[in-house]
Amino acid sequence: MKNILVTGGAGFIGSAFVRHMVEAYPDYRIICYDKLTYAGNLDNLLSVSDEENYRFKRGDIADRQTVESVLQANNIDTIVNFAAESHVDRSILDPDAFVHTDVVGAYILLDEGRKHGIGRFCHVSTDEVYGDIDLGQSSEDDQFLPNSPYAASKAGGELMVRAYHVTYGMDTVVTRGSNTYGPYQYPEKLIPFFTTEAIDDKPLPLYGDGKQIRDWLYVDDHALGVDFLLHHGISGQAYNLAGENQRFNIDVTKRILELLGKPQSLIKHVPDREGHDRRYAMSAQKARQLGWTRKFDFETGIEATVRWYLENEWWWRKIKTGAYLDYYERQYAERLATAKLP
């Protein structure tokens, strides 16, 4: 393992992984490959942009010719695939982009990687492939029951990884992360969205009764988990990277407001989104038995996250313009018109 291609490396979790790998493994060459869609941001990588073992290449994982040239030009022996369309709301509005990247893109990476003879393919997936979990926790052998176009596209990409391991003997490992939060997260997801809106005293459009349960994993724990499984995961296996910090969305929202010193009257209950899963929960026992550990509990992580957005307005204010506002209008304007107070 020497020359590692990190796809989607300018995104939220991918950039945390790139920053970690560049600093932790100076003998590795880390090639960040990203299409730089709306959620890809080279500002996320400013801290490593001048490091000798870091390179950036712009490209789409579904562009076979460019993938092939990057693999050859950099003598890539390892691929870590973070590249994905990842926002459920957007998958409902535009599922085509999710199939293109999350399924077709994963297939092309696998196929070109196989032809190039790479040593290991690490695929980053999500707890949403398991679907809605009424009771208990999902384990790695549970069936997939995705309920959104996003979750279905991630399940499809995972199945391609499995097929390439079984059919061609590729050395693969899959990670399934729970809801991840922290610095540099694009402000369409719940925690950065509500944090940045509340800073400006804007209404927070909370879906339904806010009693959806999510399992929260701090981004640094997620990045280090992928690193750990890249090096130690058993070929052909999948591993849950779970925060095991379950919270109601409404409680997370109230904690953000408390940390910012803002009133709960900013919360506006809006009509729920289509096919909204009620509860996610995974067991991380398999990864823990292998040796992975988390460093952050939820309270430590949420305090650090809210503080980061307060101190780094330079990063998010320039994002929340133009196309972002167009999306906000499509997704929330009508809902907010019928909003209810807490």
Image (cartoon, grey):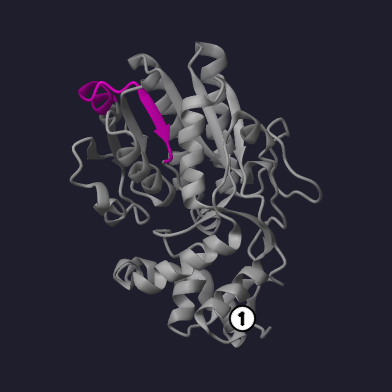
Q: Secondary structure at mark 1?
A: strand
Q: Which residue is mark 1?
A: 268
Q: Position of residue 154 (x, y in %)?
A: 55, 40
Q: Is residue 260 above or below residue 40?
A: below
Q: Is residue 256 above or below residue 6?
A: below
- Report the span colored magenta: 68-82
Residue 148 magenta: no
Residue occupying image coordinates x 44% and y 74%: 196
Taking the view exactly as shown, the residue that stands out farthest to the top is 168
User: Which image quarter is the N terminus in?
Assistant: top left
Q: Position of residue 128 (x, y in %)?
A: 62, 46
Q: In this rendering, does residue 326 appear at all?
A: no
Residue occupying image coordinates x 43% and y 67%: 327
Q: Residues within 10 Å of mark 1 (few under 14, many from 20)?
A: many
Residue occupying image coordinates x 46% and y 77%: 197
Please, what is the three-letter code of the amino acid marked with disc 1? Lys
Q: Is residue 169 above or below residue 2?
A: above
Taking the view exactly as shown, the residue that stands out farthest to the right is 135
* Residue 112 vs residue 47, the one in the foreground: 47
